[in-house]
Amino acid sequence: MFDMVSQVSGHLWSCDVAALCLRKVAALDGSALDRVGPTASSTLTADGGVPCVRSGDEQVAAGTIPRRSCGIPGGRRAPDSEGQMPQDGGSEAMKENSDLDPMEMAPHYYGGQAVIEGVMMRGSDRWAVAVRRPEGDIWLECHHTSTLPTRRPWLKWPMIRGCYALVDSLAIGMKALGISASRAMPEDEEELSSGAVGVSLFLAMLVFIGIFIFLPSAGTKGLDALIGNVMGDGVWFHITESIVRIVIFLAYLWSISLIADIKRVFQYHGAEHKTIAAWEHDEVLEPQNVDRYSTLHVRCGTNFLILVMLLAIFVYTAGGLLVPPPEGIVWYWAVVYHVVLRIVLLPVVAGLAYEGLRIGARYDNWLVRGIMKPGLWLQLITTKQPTPDQIEVAIRSFEAVVPAEERVGRVPQTLDSLVTIARDSLEVSLESAEVRIDPDADPAPDAEDAPSRQGDGDT
């Protein structure tokens, strides 16, 4: 199990770790990546689009994704004060407020991340992780998200907000991974301690730095030595290094997709995308409805990573030229110098990527679509078709973060897996679920009042 945690941790650092950061970027109103019309049939595609309510396999084959998955979540546009549906472009009230930051006006967009045998979902004020346990039940726990940006306004400043969003997403993602690692084990296996999970995540970070920062620099230096040191530390060294990094990244994703444990994580990744897309298309969250949607989603963190890779070419090249290594330095110390410089510049790259997506998300044009396409292609590797059991886990995690009043008429009625809720979880209401509080935990002071079948409280 420790090896499994290490493998999945490495994957999260390399691929899914930025997903929630992108969710914040995509939370724009009608001027977002997709301008929502009155129908739900348009798709984001270069050739004019096809109906988006298609099976996942068909959409993957066609290379299309739901445009409306970028649209207003939870339903179609509401009628105005006179009962009329607003036309594309917004009502007069929206036009009057056009000078406001769309981020401040936008409704909330849900995001998520695949973990070991489960899915983490994030809402406006809470996040939840649901894990399929070996016994067959679903472990569920829900926690508050950070309110630090509301208390520290400077965290919303340009560049800084992107770095904070990434760090915040990393923190929640790692917590969710630790929870899933502990709950996905059979009862006869010793539960992983927080220290063991921490060591695993630290090793994953070292692997990330080694594979995606050190190896490209060292490999490019080695290549330069073979061709007679013609690149030195100039522009072509940095461009070649960036190309090597992208090739390594693609090879890494493809190779880990062949590992059975990682393939299951990719299936849960697909279940997460399907569930969010189904919600954004006003579907009742039954597995058969959710499964109709594609595993591809425009707000996946893979798109963020693609932009990071592209911006890194320019930022690292500029940094290397402005602050070159000392003259006469031994080649291996030059590699170390470049590695340190890239780690220092990584927040700059992440901040620029966030701001770029924030600006680009206000427009629907060929440039935005072109930037999104490589991320969608990569999702053909990082998402796989999930099973109904995996979709059920994603639905339960999603239910836990959606306010109860928004779920009226949208909750599933056919899910039959027992849901075990952690004692330290926030209150969760699952109207159609058989729920129990974790029976193996130390009794809480008010354990006698805990619900045995249906969770109470607002979500």
Image (cartoon, grey):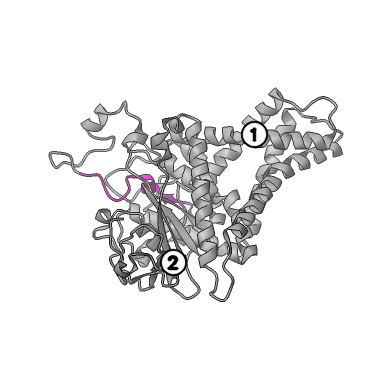
Q: Which residue is mark 2?
A: 139
How many numbered marks does the figure carry?
Answer: 2
Q: Which residue is mark 1?
A: 344
Q: Few, some or many C-alpha atoms within 10 Å of disc 2 (few <14, some 14-19, many ≥20)?
A: many
Is 72 included in the stretch rendered in magenta?
yes
Q: Please name the predominant secondary structure of the magenta segment in the image.
A: loop
Along the viewing direction, whichever of 82 and 213 lies nearer the viewer: 213
Residue at 37% over, 66% down: 287
Task: Give the label on residue 306, or none.
Answer: none
Asked which secondary structure carries label 2, the reply is: strand
Residue at 51% over, 52% down: 173
- In the image: residue 294, left or right of residue 337: left
- In the image: residue 217, left or right of residue 394: right
Most distant residue in the left direction: 82
* Location of residue 97 in the rendering, given as x and y in whole percent from the top left corner: 27, 28
Residue type, label 1: Val
Most distant residue in the top direction: 322
Regarding residue 388, the answer to whether it shows in the image is no
The boundaries of the magenta stretch are 64-78
* Location of residue 422 in the rendering, given as x and y in whole percent from the top left corner: 41, 64
* Location of residue 244 in the rendering, given as x and y in whole percent from the top left corner: 70, 42
Residue type, label 2: Trp
Is 105 included in the stretch rendered in magenta?
no
Along the viewing direction, whichever of 380 and 317 lies nearer the viewer: 317
Along the viewing direction, whichever of 90 and 420 lies nearer the viewer: 420
Regarding residue 243, the answer to whether it shows in the image is yes
Q: Quadrant of residue 194?
A: bottom right
Along the viewing direction, whichever of 364 and 159 lies nearer the viewer: 159
Q: Earlier in the sequence, mark 2 or mark 1?
A: 2
* Location of residue 9 in the rendering, given as x and y in whole percent from the top left corner: 60, 55
